[in-house]
């Protein structure tokens, strides 16, 4: 089903989402970045779908502005997470521009996943003629150059303040796909092993991937057949083996939605299923649908001794969306 058909078939929900995005609730906080409480153990900024183009000045400016605003934070920012679609067409000049913006405007550590536009959409609109395998190698190369690592795969882990972040991505099997994601047995084992290690002391672990999991966060309504096919890559069963697992994804271009709207229509920005918490990030660089439509939106994730707090906000305007915040307890 196309996106247009998905919108038309759920037109009532779409209109309600757009209306509720503008209904003021709980007031509007000042554009000052801070944690919501004292004794924060981990403070991470999260965005997705920047869709940078080599000559796309607006999206580049959105990203630069949002990153510069992080410098106003009254609390330490431990990392920035970007869950894919860094570029629009998978071309190397756009990938270089993305990392140039990150390096020049954010002083901290960035944890970066690749999306379908970075790998699957090579050749889109004749912007580039490289293969998907070559696009994947470019993704690995540019992250290595940025991070100083020597990765050979499109998946890896990073530990921040003692908390593990596991990045998973497209392995490009047999030429790969336009929008779908392939995972090898080696990557699935990597995910299992890293989850076992990261959760062994009762700490939350964060799995970062561009693609949502099928039928969660409203994926089947917003972007049908766009998630990770569990019949092929059953990451859900792997994650459900462990406590305190958080799965953070993008891809759906679904705007921030109030928690009430999520309960009414099932299109949730964050939800728990069989013990795993799934967080769907809005698109940063393109207009959103089924929720707050504005570009520049993402979230701040905070970890405390007994809970994880997810607080959506606009990185450009500084507005916090207090009607869409979530709090999840940590299982001891």
Image (cartoon, rainbow, N blue to C red):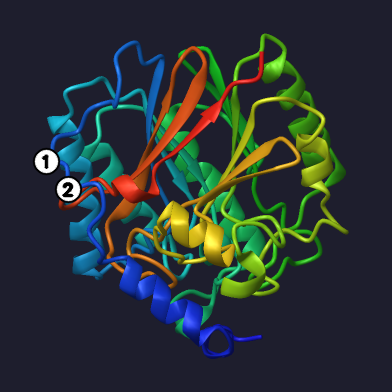
Q: In which quarter of the image is the C terminus?
A: top right
What residue do we see at 77% from left, 51% from top? 183
Q: Position of residue 167 (x, y in %)?
A: 60, 38
Give whichever of 101, 262 is nearer the camera: 262
Q: Quadrant of residue 241?
A: top right
Q: How crowded is mark 2: few (under 14 residues within 10 Å), some or many (20 or more)?
A: few
Q: In which quarter of the image is residue 325?
A: top left
Q: Position of residue 57 (x, y in %)?
A: 19, 67
Tell us which disc is closer to us: 2 or 1.
Answer: 2
What residue do we see at 76% from left, 20% from top? 196
Give whichever of 28, 204 is nearer the camera: 28
Q: In this view, does 101 lie to the left or right of 275?
A: left
Q: How crowded is mark 1: few (under 14 residues within 10 Å), some or many (20 or more)?
A: few
Number of numbered discs: 2
Q: Are marks 2 and 1 in contact (CB under 8 Å)?
A: yes
What residue do we see at 29% from left, 14% from top? 38
Residue that label 1 marks:
30
Q: Position of residue 303 (x, y in %)?
A: 45, 22
**Can see residue 153?**
yes
Residue that label 2 marks:
28
Query: Against 6, is 259 above or below?
Result: above
Query: Against 193, is 219 above or below?
Result: below
């Amino acid at each position: 089903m196309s996106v247009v058909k998905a919108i038309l078939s759920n037109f009532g929900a779409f209109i309600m989402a757009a209306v509720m995005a503008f209904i003021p609730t709980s007031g509007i906080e000042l554009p000052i970045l801070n944690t919501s409480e004292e004794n924060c153990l981990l403070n991470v900024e999260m965005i997705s779908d920047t869709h940078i183009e080599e000559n796309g000045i607006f999206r580049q400016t959105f990203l630069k502005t949002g990153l510069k605003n992080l410098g106003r934070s009254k609390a330490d920012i431990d990392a920035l997470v970007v869950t894919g679609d860094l570029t629009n067409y998978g071309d190397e000049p756009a990938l270089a521009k993305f990392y140039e913006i990150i390096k020049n405007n954010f002083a901290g550590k960035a944890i970066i996943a690749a999306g379908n536009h970075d790998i699957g959409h090579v050749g889109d609109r004749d912007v580039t003629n490289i293969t998907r395998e070559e696009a994947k190698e470019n993704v690995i190369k540019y992250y290595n150059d940025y991070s100083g690592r020597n990765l050979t795969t499109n998946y890896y882990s990073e530990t921040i303040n003692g908390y593990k972040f596991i990045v998973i991505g497209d392995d490009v099997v047999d030429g790969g796909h336009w929008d779908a994601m392939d995972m090898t047995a080696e990557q699935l084992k990597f995910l299992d092993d890293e989850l076992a290690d990261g959760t062994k002391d009762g700490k939350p672990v964060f799995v970062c991937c561009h693609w949502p999991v099928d039928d969660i966060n409203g994926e089947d309504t917003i972007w049908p057949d766009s998630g990770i096919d569990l019949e092929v890559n059953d990451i859900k069963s792997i994650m459900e083996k462990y406590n305190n697992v958080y799965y953070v994804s993008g891809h759906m271009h679904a705007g921030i939605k109030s928690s009430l709207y999520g309960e009414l229509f099932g299109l949730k920005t964050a939800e728990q299923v069989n013990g795993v918490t799934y967080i769907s990030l809005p698109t940063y660089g393109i207009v959103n649908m089924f929720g707050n439509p504005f570009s520049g939106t993402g979230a701040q994730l905070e970890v405390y001794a007994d809970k994880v707090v997810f607080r959506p906000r606009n990185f450009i305007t500084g507005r916090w969306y207090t009607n869409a915040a979530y709090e999840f307890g940590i299982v001891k």
